[in-house]
Amino acid sequence: MRTNLNGMKRVAQAVSLAVALLSAPAAYAQVFADWGVHDQQEYVQTPLLESGLFAHNYTFVLPENNNLYAVAVSNNLFEDNHIQNGRIGLWGGIPGEAVWLGAFNEYDFDGDTGHTVRSFTGLTGGDYFYRVSGEAIGTADIAGLYSLTSSLAPIPEPEIYAMMGIGLGFMGWIVRRRKLQVA
C-alpha cells in the first residue's frame, strides 16, 4: 500500500511541475544562449548551481527549410547531482512572442534512460528556440547538469529525389546488362 502512495505522489508531483512549467509566463524562462544562425551542430552543457525549478531558452534562426535532430540528457551520475522531470520543447518565434509547435515537439529526458533523440521535421526557415526545463534536486555545488545537442538535416528538394531515382535506375540497367553478358 505504501508503494502505491509513493507512486501516486510522484505522479502528482510530475503533473504539477509540468502544468507549472507549461503555464509559466515567458519571463520565467530566461534566454540562456543565442546561437544566432543554427550551425550544422550546436552543443551546450549547462551546470545548474542551485536546486529548484529551471527553464532555459536556446534561441536560433533556421535560414532555410530543415529538419532538426535534438538530443538531451541529464547527467545524473550521483544522488547529489541530479535533475528530475527534465523536459525539452521546440517553439517557433522568439521568447515572449512564441508559437507552441504542438505536443509532438516536446519530450522528456533524464539520465536514468541514457539519452533521448527527437526529430523535428519539415521546419520552415525562421526563428525558433528550445526550452529546456525541469528541477535540479542535487545537493552538491552543482545541483544538476544537462547537455543539449541540436543537428541540422536539410530537407531534400524534389530534384534530389529525381537524381537519386535516375542514378538507381542507371545502376539497375548496368547490373542487368552485365548479367546478360555473362549468360
Image (cartoon, rainbow, N blue to C red):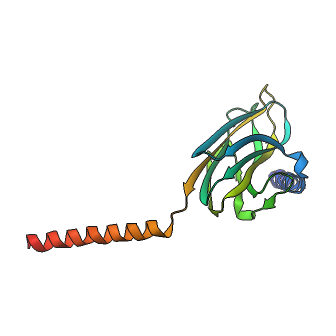
Name the spot of residue 128 as percent of width and height, x first: 73, 54
Give the residue drawn at x 9%, y 70%.
Answer: 182
Q: Position of residue 106 (x, y in %)?
A: 72, 57
Residue found at x 39% / y 67%: 163
Q: Is residue 29 above or below residue 142?
A: below
Residue in the image at 89% along x and 57% along y: 23
Q: Quadrant of residue 46?
A: top right
Residue 88 visible in rendering: no
Q: In the figure, is residue 101 to the left or right of 118?
A: right
Quadrant, the C terminus? bottom left
View extreme (top): residue: 141
Q: Is residue 60 visible?
A: yes
Q: Is residue 43 left or right of residue 26?
A: left
As drawn, is 158 to the left or to the right of 2?
left
| Residue 138 drawn above or below residue 112 | above
Q: How many labels were placed on the picture?
A: 0
Give the quadrant of the N terminus.
Answer: bottom right
Question: Residue 133 at what x, y percent from top left?
Answer: 79, 46
- Observer-nearest of 176 and 76: 176
Q: Is residue 25 left or right of residue 137?
A: right
Q: Nearer the viewer, residue 123 or 105?
A: 123
Between 39 and 179, the residue placed more toward the observer is: 39
Which of the 4 image quadrants contains residue 34?
top right
Residue 61 versus residue 120: which sits nearer the camera? 61
Percent across and percent down for residue 43 are: 63, 40
